[in-house]
Amino acid sequence: MATLLQGLGVASAFSASPSLDSKKLQLRSLSGRKAGIYVVRSDASLNLHTGAPKAGRLITNAVVAKGDSSAASTSSKPGHELLLFEALREGLEEEMERDPTVCVMGEDVGHYGGSYKVTKDLANKFGDLRVLDTPIAENSFTGMGIGAAMTGLRTVVEGMNMGFLLLAFDQISNNCGMLHYTSGGQFKIPIVIRGPGGVGRQLGAEHSQRLESYFQSIPGIQMVACSTPYNAKGLMKAAIRSKNPVILFEHVLLYNLKERIPDEEYVLSLEESEMVRPGEHVTILTYSRMRYHVMHAAKTLVNKGYDPEVIDIRSLKPFDLHTIGNSIKKTHRVLIVEECMRTGGIGASLTAAINENFHDYLDAPVVCLSSQDVPTPYAGPLEEWTVVQPAQIVTAVEKLCQ
Amino acid sequence: MAVSRLASSSSSSGSSLVKPISAALSFTSSLRRSLSSSADDSTTLTIETSLPFTSHNCDPPSRAVETSPKELMSFFREMALMRRMEIAADSLYKAKLIRGFCHLYDGQEAVAVGMEAAITKKDCIITAYRDHCTFLGRGGTLLEVFAELMGRQAGCSKGKGGSMHFYKKENGFYGGHGIVGAQIPLGCGLAFAQKYSKDETVTFASYGDGAANQGQLFEALNMAALWDLPAILVCENNHYGMGTAEWRAAKSPAYYKRGDYVPGLKVDGMDVLAVKQACKFAKEYALKNGPLILEMDTYRYHGHSMSDPGSTYRTRDEISGVRQERDPVERVRKLLTSHDIASEKELKDIEKEIRKAVDEAIAQAKESPMPEPSELFTNVYVKGYGVEMVGDRGATFQDGVTFLPKIYSRHL
């Protein structure tokens, strides 16, 4: 278990290759799209694309569905390959082994192994008390997790879907976020609240919510969003070790992403963002699933001669304005691509923060592509149109760079 | 009406007075006679509670409570102190030195004091916003109370919490919570941690009759019962949820029965000895069997808070009636004088001392400064976050925006 000193440069080297791998796999899944599709832009205007090449096609499968090992893995490379949910489990397991005060509670995390298999087999290994199956009572088991954290236990509370945590909003806002402050520093709440959110595959409106926008104003909490197996494991470990309450946002569609991660132990920083692709022309800020849409669009953009700089902001609260600022000082143009709603989302806050701090460095207004302000519909095509598609990203960059 | 079986005591004259002991000798356990002076803690008194306990799904504890003159004196002192503190807070609020919400506990002192007598500082207490006296019972000082109420630096939460956010972690007092009912799941979490660490300690999670209708109480109770957590849920039933009487808010105001599969005990919350007995019983029970509900039948003289006159939904006769018949401090005073443990004059002197101590604490608190402006930003996060940050410059605040340093992450 050697420790790794991760410099930012090293981290980006690690992150660059897996995203390219997953991009290769994404392209493979494209097949037989018909021409002439309506693309609903994020500003709610309709455009008809007729027979346009790759740029006009709606990418419905911009993430890897199943792990495809043929392209990526070779036995001579160091590290081991796993899927994102396995990376989360590895991080959780390592922390539970290391520290006996780490415990998990949530619905179906124990005997069932977790509804997304993140806690599979952990109950067998650590026992029922440390991997606790709770009844369906989000408000009170989140409160219980916070109460236990007040005494020093490091609880990991799993929301089966982030949307269910709306029931626990009072506990998260008042007790989790504020107790350290209102007690004058007496209580630390080293809790991790994690779960999948975001728009999935036709899960319906209530199960496709983006809670990061609702939680972002709560003082005293940190929010991070993972997007690759590498950063999922690193952020999980960092979140558990943090003395502050951390909300870790996972995404339903990213659980089966495959990547090769180091064998050695590593922990990432909760406040840092990830440089996915350095560039010169435009800064694209994104997180979670939209990273893959952006990278897909980046491939198109590169072919067209643009050089986008893609940053996965990872830390949703607080924003890593240092990295973002340096990027803006270089490129002078910003595009934010997110899955949050247009109104009051992470992108809205980030736009405000960038305008406040880096206004002088901007050559064009900040463009923010977000999901539509609608409940996520069930029908497939409608659901696709609620989130930002790579084609829209390409168009936005072209417009921005004129 | 406390019926006492006297073991022994002596007046200041030194001779022992033996009062006739009736045939119900079975109540008295360890009787010792001695020619010791009053307030000697080697004597044991056994006093019967004014009302029997009513139980639900369990055997109630005995009505006979063992105590000592020393303990009774301490009960008097603590309750009188709490009473005086709350009345002083009332005046400070009217003088606009305390702002916002101020929920006073006078009338309910017996619950806080009786509970303390039955447990240790390793056990946890968590309660709602009517927390001044519980905080004092848990080892808080008058200065910390008044300074916090006035928002000064010397306050227990550095002036940043206010009346509803008193905490004392090292003495097992977990607050101090403003949202009705939210402290109950927290309390079950404390009990969970106690079970996890095998501490052999318990948690008392207090709530009011208004909060008894919160869903999260039943959620938490279900989990506590499922996992046998050492949690004792204490319903401080003062019969009014802010302005709504209990019979108007609850279909079943028998709060001790609401646990259904969880046993419950109804206790006369104005009788400090009954509270002590019930809490002692509850602690033993919870360590062995899991959660228990205690309903303390108590009363608050003030309104819900300082903004509530407290007389629009109840009559002044009711308030003064309770004050005459059931006041907890008066009860202990009568016990002390009737058992010749202390004379009226001694008790009045103690009250004078208390008044002086409270006035001094208020004066000291008034001298404590307001928090520095930089305190606005402290304690939002725990310093150092998760991973150790090694960088060429630390985090800076510039016009309210955090700039984080260029860092290397290194795990701890």
Image: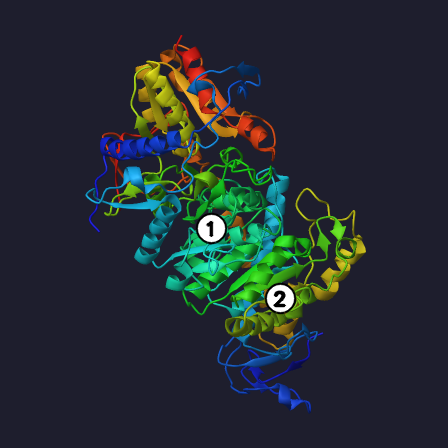
Bin the neighbour count of mark 2 within 10 Å (Cα to Cα): few under 14, some 14-19, many 20 and up: many
Residue type at tag 2: Ile
To which chain does the residue with label 1 belong?
Answer: A
Dots 2, 1 in contact, CB < 8 A:
no
Q: In the image, B252: left or right of B72?
A: right
Q: CA distance from mark 2 to mark 1?
A: 27 Å
Image position, residue B251 (x, y; %): 77, 58
Where the N terminus of chain B falls, by quadrant?
A: bottom right
User: Looking at this rendering, what residue extends furthest in the bottom direction?
Assistant: B23
Image position, residue B353 (x, y; %): 53, 58
B129 or A136: nearer the viewer: A136
Q: Which residue is mark 2?
A: B293
| Residue at x-position 31% and y-position 34% | A21
To which chain does the residue with label 2 belong?
Answer: B
| Residue at x-position 42% and y-position 28% | A293
Q: Secondary structure at mark 2?
A: strand
Relative to A92, residue A301 above or below: above
Image position, residue A30 (x, y; %): 43, 29
Q: Which residue is mark 1?
A: A157
Image position, residue B262 (x, y; %): 62, 68
User: Looking at this rendering, what residue extends furthest in the top direction?
Assistant: A402
